[in-house]
Image: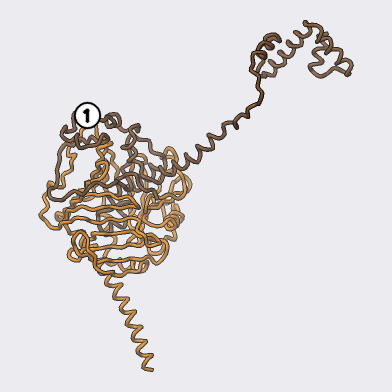
Chain colours: A orange, B brown
Amino acid sequence: MKRLAVALLAGAHCSLAFAQTQDDALAWLESIYQATRRLNYAGVFTYKNGREVETARIIHIVDGANVHERIEVLDGPLREIIRSNDEVRCYTPATMTVKIEKNLGDRPLLPVLPGNFKGIADNYRMRLAGVDRVAGNDCQSLVLEPRDALRYGHQLCADVRTRMVLKAQTLDSAQEPMEGFAFTQIEFGGAIPREWLRPRFASLSRDWRVEETDAVAVVAASSAWTLQNPPSGFQRLAELKRRFRSAPDVSQIVLSDGLSAVSVFIEPVQGRQPPPSLGASRRGALHAFTRKIDEHLVTAVGDAPAECVQTIANGVRFRGSQ
Amino acid sequence: MSERISSLIDGELGSDAEIDQVLRELGEHAPHREEWNTYHLIGDALRATHGAGGLSREGFSKRLAAEPTVLAPRRKPAPSARPMRWSLPIAASIAAVVFVGWFASSMFESPGQASPLAGSMARPSLVSTQAGGKSSPSQSGFLSTQQQVPVLSAATPPSVAVPLFIRPDGMLLPPAQGVAAAGADALLDDYVWAHQRYSPASLMHDVAPYVRLVSGRGAGQ
């Protein structure tokens, strides 16, 4: 009798401990999310995708409600990305092009509110996994394992002091890293000079080609499209009407389970020449699936395995209201 | 006689004895042989058969005598369906690489690409002679022949050490201007550009998604 009681207690203790670990990890996730919005930092990181590695320098300054950022790629052809709140400019001097994107409306990250983190636990097993050192800082490691084959796993290392993620990896089904980044140098603090944000190409001559895309938020109720049976946990994060240079009328619906995101793009077929190919495709960790509905091209693109992306694409239905 | 020659050619002569007789006469009388040639020529021309070049019997004999004697006929190679068969898988695999891989870097590595600066960039000169003189001469010594960067104003953050160059990789460059991207590529490029700010990385940290905008010869996986 006594042994049974001890066994029950032990079992209860274990599951309690497990629940605590899950909660600890959730708490870390929440604080990571909050921290990134408040921090000023300058540093150098490497970005890895498969076997390819690239290095970039980043300066990130938060000024009241404004966020300014500059990323300069240090390897290969020079590229520079300047972000200022919702506007992103990408400079490529080798082709003398600058691509500008303006998003109207809130930054899309906000819908993942702290309260929604609980939903992540439904689809990922979460645990803390020891303390590493990254760029000279002690970092808490978090592991997020998917509960099904429709999403990737993640491993994050967040600085214990500032809660900023200094190292992150996306893992495939074999727990192998597919894509990731890691800081090699980082400095936090407010004393970052403003002129570090200035792009190299402050004034462009007439020879530069400017390509603008923009996006307008769409109210979900007026959407002409529904998504049926998305994989568990995937909810509508945002919907936008977009304009690209080669396609002026594209709808984008973003689904997310809190960690992975898949965008569904819908556009009229005749906009594209030559006509794009249908079916599955892939770019590193991103998978895409394209199909045709009536005279529309529907493509799902996301940081998720091919099966997930295909499931989402196949669930797109035309509702007809416009 | 002309009618009988004509009938012989058409295979309408009645009996073997008649055929024999016409053939004998053809052999013995040259005018009949000329007629025989003529009728064949007419037939060939009507059928548009190759070789109806108006060659007379004498001319043909001369040409035949001039032909080298072939003792062992050489087997001709199979008709050229083979080149086509080879090129299709290669074309498909190239298309797959283009579709799956990163395409913008190819602009920098093959001078033949049609980018606005292709001509000037391919020129291996240390002295910058760009249009408008935008390049600073002091920089040209450091830059490779492929990159002559029009640096207009340099804002270099001090004290953050620059690591050694490593090979580029990346997800995407803004759709290449001046380079005709394959239809599928252009579509996906637009989409990846639009999607990247929603990537999981951007939910936790703002860094990686925009690095995906950069390109290089990726592994293509």
The single residue placed furthest to the front in the displayed view is B71
**Amino acid on which disc 1 is placed:** Gln
Which residue matches tag 1? B130
| Identity of the residue drawn at 37% across and 54% down | A285
Q: Quadrant of residue A275?
A: top left
Residue A187 position (above or below residue B183): below
Q: Is residue B22 left or right of residue A293?
A: right
The single residue placed furthest to the bottom in the displayed view is A1
Q: Is residue A176 left or right of residue B7?
A: left
x and y percentages locating residue A20 in the rendered image: 29, 76
Q: Quadrant of residue A212?
A: top left
| Identity of the residue drawn at 17% across and 39% down | A202
x and y percentages locating residue A309 in the rendered image: 42, 55
Which quadrant does the N terminus of chain A fall into? bottom left
x and y percentages locating residue B122 in the rendered image: 29, 31
How many marks on residues? 1
Q: Chain of mark 1?
A: B
Q: Is residue A178 left or right of residue B35?
A: left
Mark 1 element type: loop
Residue A290 appearing in the image: yes
| Identity of the residue drawn at 40% across and 64% down | A232
x and y percentages locating residue A80 in the rendered image: 23, 44
Report the front residue among B92 and B73: B73
Mark 1 burial class by Cα count in 10 Å: few <14, some 14-19, many 20+: some
Report the front residue among B11 and B22: B22
Residue A223 appearing in the image: no
Q: Quadrant of residue B136?
A: top left
